[in-house]
Amino acid sequence: MSGMERCRVMLEAARIIREQREEIATMETINNGKSIFEARVDIDISWQCLEYYAGLAGSLAGEHIQLPGGSFGYTRREPLGVCVGIGAWNYPFQIACWKSGPALACGNAMVYKPSPFTPISVVRLAEIFTEAGVPKGLFNVVQGGAATGQLLCQHPDVAKISFTGSVPTGMKIMEMAAKGIKPVTLELGGKSPLIIFSDADLENAVKGALMANFLTQGEVCCNGTRVFVERKILDTFTKEVVKRTQKIKIGDPLLEDTRMGALINRPHLNRVQGFIKQAKEQGAEVLCGGDLYVPDDPKLKNGYYMRPCVLGNCKDDMTCVKEEIFGPVMAILPFDTEEEVLERANATKFGLAGGVFTRDIQKAHRVVAALKAGMCFINNYNVSPVELPFGGYKSSGFGRENGRAAIEYYSQLKTVCVEMGDVESAF
Ligand SMILES: NC(=O)c1ccc[n+]([C@@H]2O[C@H](COP(=O)([O-])OP(=O)(O)OC[C@H]3O[C@@H](n4cnc5c(N)ncnc54)[C@H](O)[C@@H]3O)[C@@H](O)[C@H]2O)c1
Ligand SMILES: C[N+](C)(C)CCCC=O
């Protein structure tokens, strides 16, 4: 298909998703356990992503380059072929759109494997693509776990792998990709810093800290879980964060006023609570939450609910400050100077995201320029306009999703050199 034809089909898919927003969001809530309130936002980001790449599909082009003697060259932006997408369980539908959007816009096919913990909503996406006119077999869903993922990565017909998941799995994916000389996009974990200066708008900073920690039960790769607070405002900020955290409505994720649903499964809930236990043993203070939450509704009493947790008295060398918890656990860390906080913020193997709250515009830009992270926020956190590239530094991965940047990762350049004169042979 031409770029314009692909554009039309993708716009139709975006339209169907928009039209079926409520049904898909409900399915996603059942799939993952996140609140319906948030699932709706995920679905909106998903159709926006398809719409955005539909817009780019028709404008993909190479360049024309003039050479001496009237000769010239040109480049063609060509698809890679069959791309494999492997997704995590925290944003099942959205991750599938972040991968299939640019992949299909560039003219590739995609075989997508969702996490076995959230297998359902991406099947609906495949149906929607078909309804919209995507040719049969162009977007495929294969269900399974690690073994299935490995087979896909090792398949000789696969041209590219785009993976979202943990750092340990990312390493394995990269090894398999290396054996087949396949390009790979790795969207991995994080332990991102959020820096609150004393001149920040306190109301916004508090809201930002909650956004940075408690969306999707805290199971968010780019969460700003190390909240560095300038000592002057530590007490006021902490008091307000704790007060608001305690007010988060937990429970049946399908209810309109619920803002925190259930964690993904029992082993993960136990793991998150294990981090909190260890934090206490290492000297952190639980300022609120961290315990199990049992909803009144008897049918939910065995659900994987916990109260969102704020940890005080944290130190940089504690496990809860160094490791990705992937649950609703915020660590608050005081700081005194800009230089000090930057050094501490960057002292991590991860580099997915980072944020700063301040009214000083020069300081804000200076700080984000110094942060070693792929996605930085000034005076907000965890918003995701599809126009902006998203991806990590260091162990958080490489390659980018969203924005024009993703086109580079789903296409390849062919150069054509055209001779307009005679061949000057060396022989
Ligand atoms: N950077 C991002 O955009 C982003 C987004 C969401 C989640 N994440 C990260 O994902 C992690 C949580 O997700 P998870 O628990 O699903 O991660 P995971 O690494 O356990 O699994 C991710 C996917 O990889 C598959 N998989 C597992 N082993 C495999 C193997 N050997 N070969 C091929 N595929 C394999 C799984 O079945 C799943 O589909 C967190 O670390 C989180 O930070 C990152
Ligand atoms: C939409 N968020 C909140 C920015 C999450 C992006 C995907 C990371 O887990």
Image (cartoon, rainbow, N blue to C red):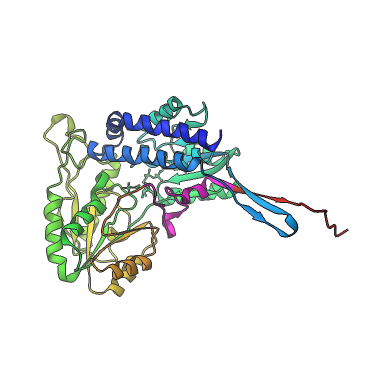
Above or below, 84 relative to 213: above
In this view, 142 is above or below 413: above
Q: Is residue 411 magenta?
A: yes
* Residue visible at 22% across and 56% down in the picture: 209
Q: Is residue 277 visible?
A: no
Name above or below for residue 106 compared with residue 202: above
- Residue 146, percent from left and from top: 45, 39
Quadrant of residue 131 within the rendered picture:
top left
Q: Nearer the viewer, residue 354 or 275?
A: 354
Q: Is residue 55 shown above or below 12?
A: below
Q: Going by the image, does 223 lie left or right of 112?
A: left
Q: Is residue 181 magenta?
A: no
Residue 205: horizontal and vertical position, in percent? 20, 59
What x and y, as percent, mark residue 339? 31, 74
Q: Quarter-wise, where is residue 199 in the image? A: bottom left
Residue at point 40%, 58% (across, down): 374
Which region shows up in magenta? 386-412
- Furthest residue toward right: 427
> Is residue 286 visible in the rendered structure shown here?
yes
For the N terminus, the quadrant is top right
Residue 68 locus on image (x, y percent): 73, 60
Foreground residue, 57 or 407?
A: 57
Image quadrant in which the C terminus is located: bottom right
- Counting the numbered discs, the total is 0
Taking the image as shown, residue 159 lies to the left or right of residue 45, namely right
